[in-house]
Image (cartoon, rainbow, N blue to C red):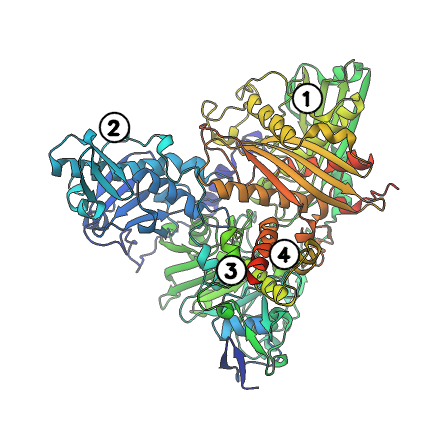
Amino acid sequence: MSNSTRDLTLREMIEKSRLETEVKAKTPSTVNRRDFLKGIAVGSLVILCSADGTTTAARAKDLANNQNLSPSLFVAVEPDGTVQVLAHRSEMGTGIRTALPRVLADELSADWDRVVIRQAKGDSRLGDQNTDGSNSIRFFYKTMRAAGATARNMLEQAAANRWGVDVKEVSTANHTVYLNGVKKKLDFHQLVEDARKLDAPQVKDLRFKSPKDFQYIGKRFPIADLDAIITGEAVFGIDAHIEGQVHAVIARCPVVGGVAKSYDSDSAKAVKGVIDVIELPRFQGAPVFQQLGGIAVVAETTWAAWQGREALNVQWEEGPNADYDTEQFMAALTNTVKKNGEVTRAEGDAITAIADASKTLQATYTVPHLSHAPMETTCAVADVKTDEAGKVISCYLKAATQNPQAVQQAVGPAMGIPNDEVYCDVTLLGSGFGRKSKPDYCVEAAMISRRVKRPVHVTWTREDDFQHDYFHTISAVHCEAGLNEDGSPDGWLLRAAYPSISSTFNLQADTPATWEAEMGLTDLPYDIPNVQIEVGKAKAHTRIGWLRAVCHIFQNFAVSSFADELADAAGRDPYEYLLTTLGEDRELDLTKLKLGNRGASAQDYPYDIGRLKNVLRRVANESKWGRHNDLPKGKGLGIACCRSFLGYTGHVVEASVSPKGSVSVDNVWVSIDAGTIVSLDRVLAQVEGATIMGISQAMYGEMPMKKGRPIHSNFDGFQVAKMSDSPDSINIDIVKSEAAPGGVGETGIGSSAPALCNAIFAATGKRVRSLPIKNHDLSWG
Amino acid sequence: MATINVNGQQRDVTDVPPATPLLWVLRDHLGLTGTKYGCGVSECGACTIHIDGEAVQSCVTPVSDVGEGKIVTIEGLSKNGDHPVQQAWREHNVPQCGYCQVGQMMTCAAMLAANPDPTDDDINEGMWNICRCGTYNRIRDAVKTAAKEMK
């Protein structure tokens, strides 16, 4: 893989693959460009905010007729005062469908009971819709505030004009504009008609609320979908319905890249309810987001399609990945990281510093493939209409997708129509964790619908989900250090090897991409004079995809475990050792270290060692770290910290290990600094969930593969954490901050697993260097 | 078997093959989509419903086994979504994505009906449903709140 490809961001990599595969066929569409104002009352005040931050006001008829307007996000205040807010990010459990509209409503001073949230379709004019990478608040906090402030400022101006006063003499609260000092007030609905005749103010002239006046931002509020979820009325992808739909279940080759040699179509069709059996072609080139290919059984019901598939008896030509064996592959990876790799960061001379040190340590850490296993499997329903010649004339989907624009980009070429003529509504997602930002299942639904000329709902069974995931990569990270007289590291060497996510977009990719290595490896935060970081080569033999927290899962596991090993070798307290090794409060030089910083500016998002040390101090304090030496054998505290997705976390885990080696996580403390936060309760919920997922992956997570096949096909094999694994308490401390909003959803994962393994070491003296923990004998009595 | 009793109503299932799991009968034939598919092998609990008050995994229950049994799904657990378990789930803001929560609440309601005062061990054992978002600690709190309310 060339350096130029390695340096591409993931976003650029996806875009490049898309452009390379895209069919540029222009097809006349029978579907009119959708009207942004559908469902919004005539005479509303509509605020458009484009991606560059400019705002405009538009009247309904302008917007409906003017193709040149490029609305990004908007709020509409209807003549009855109802406020409609567009939610353009996907709801998969983070609460984003509520949080961003709350930001807008706060800046508008709207009464939440009069706010209606509308879920957006996929549309590039809305800006980024890829609900992935813990980016939603970071990307759109300012935009939502600008949209809300624009509408409020215009309503205030309309009121000031009505009363013949300067706008400085009015104020707004709870859907009402007041004339200060006088008992005069006007509800929003009384101002809409006048406000919509005004010019929208420039963003630079907007009067924003002071954070001390925030009504919703940073406060506790419930998710908008709470009642629908609790009564069972919430519509997820599996529940999405298009009138006249049939159901499809697909047999796919158990080895990525294989094709069907033979199958028994007649037996499948003999199953009651089966309508048709359709062969889907294998994907071409790199997998990207194309469908895998296989044999689809279409039926009146899901169960009939499933039973039809059972009857297919497919024989597969398995292709070049049929020899993939993760046990052998892991042995090769651990061998690779023992040898020199490609140097991606070097300060001083780590090799000499380690060779000359009085004390040296080395350890290799491994993490196996993992599955996303979202609670809801991947599901989509597509309705593709064709003309008599079979040419696609319209394409509509409802999907549980993290990225409806990726659906457009994948389905468009497959249907031979421009991407923006693919219409995709977004349902609620029964979690995603990264799996549902890869819309191969939407392509399947569209291809089958085109063939059977009916709306088709594709359901992945749980077996499909486990067997055909875009798996989290398999990895080895080797660490070496040389310690000086007081036990502090004088030289530190890190070498990592794992199949890159880039391999899903470029078959030649065989080295970790720079943005992958940066997640916990090349952004090593410690103040050490001699550092060398290397990456080794590894080819992928299955589809590799990003999973919540991505490379932090294994790179932070290695680095934070090794720091704990060094503290032990130095005979020092692990917390004190971490704090000292992090060094003086300072900002890492992102340019010098060639860190992309997730595209965020160093000014708004510095790599701030002071903030990292702060969460470490706070979590040590909250957990009463000082008691760790007094715990009896079999009980231990473990500590770890990291910066991940532009947020900072510190974890302390209190674990017990029985003499027979059974592990229980008793209590967990987390401190998180994510800058400005919007939804207090959801930040708590995300960190609780991230802690559980970290424990789940550390304790049980592994998807071994033999003969190219994942060996587990359901939750009986791929174990996950349950209630009985969850700690007695998860105590979360959120740092109050007005810094720019960082990530939350993924941020809480990175320090979770190493803190647990460090606690196990403290309890037993046994070091877990290869996950999962369940494979180790931790008995001690 | 021409009908089954779901949420107090006799529903026609004449055309359904008898081996069809009750889950898919509820979802695809009767349009009751509150009950969710998660694993198909009774490992995750997302499809949990009640038959004669007992928690049952509908994904492994052939419709032909239901007989005269009275089925209750989330749609019939309470008239206004205000069963004490549902109220407790609201109070603790339990759901993240929400997909498994119907099954969690159905498991909880049946457990509390049989054991009104569960210990932590009872909850660990009784609330075995999988939640991939990791809402377990809030579920534990909500179970305790619901137990208090139901006394």
Q: Nearer the viewer, residue A451 or B67?
A: B67
The residue that appears at 58% across and 45% down in the rendered structure is A689
Q: Given the image, what chain letter belongs to the residue carrying mark 3?
A: B
| Mark 3 and mark 4: Cα distance apart in space | 18 Å
Crowdedness near tag 3: few (<14), some (14–19) or many (≥20) residues, C-alpha within 10 Å: many
Q: Select label 4 or label 1 by which is in front.
A: 4
**Above or below for A697 versus A357:** below
Q: Which residue is mark 3?
A: B86
Sequence-wise, the earlier of marks 3 and 4 is: 3
- Residue A204 in percent (x, y) is at 28, 27
Q: Given the image, what chain letter belongs to the residue carrying mark 1?
A: A
Picture quarter containing residue A184?
Answer: top left
- Residues flagged by tags 3 and 2 on a common chain: no
Q: Which mark is residue A205?
A: 2
Q: Which residue is mark 1?
A: A532
Q: Residue flagged by tag 1: what amino acid is it?
A: Gln
Point out the residue furthest to the bottom here. Answer: B2
Q: Given the image, what chain letter belongs to the residue carrying mark 2?
A: A
Residue A281 appears anywhere in the view: no
Task: Find numbered disc 2 in the image and state the secondary structure of the residue it sits on.
Answer: helix
Q: Given the image, what chain letter belongs to the residue carrying mark 4?
A: B
Crowdedness near tag 1: few (<14), some (14–19) or many (≥20) residues, C-alpha within 10 Å: many
Q: Which mark is residue B130?
A: 4
Point out the residue furthest to the right here. Answer: A781
Q: Select label 3 or label 2 by which is in front.
A: 3
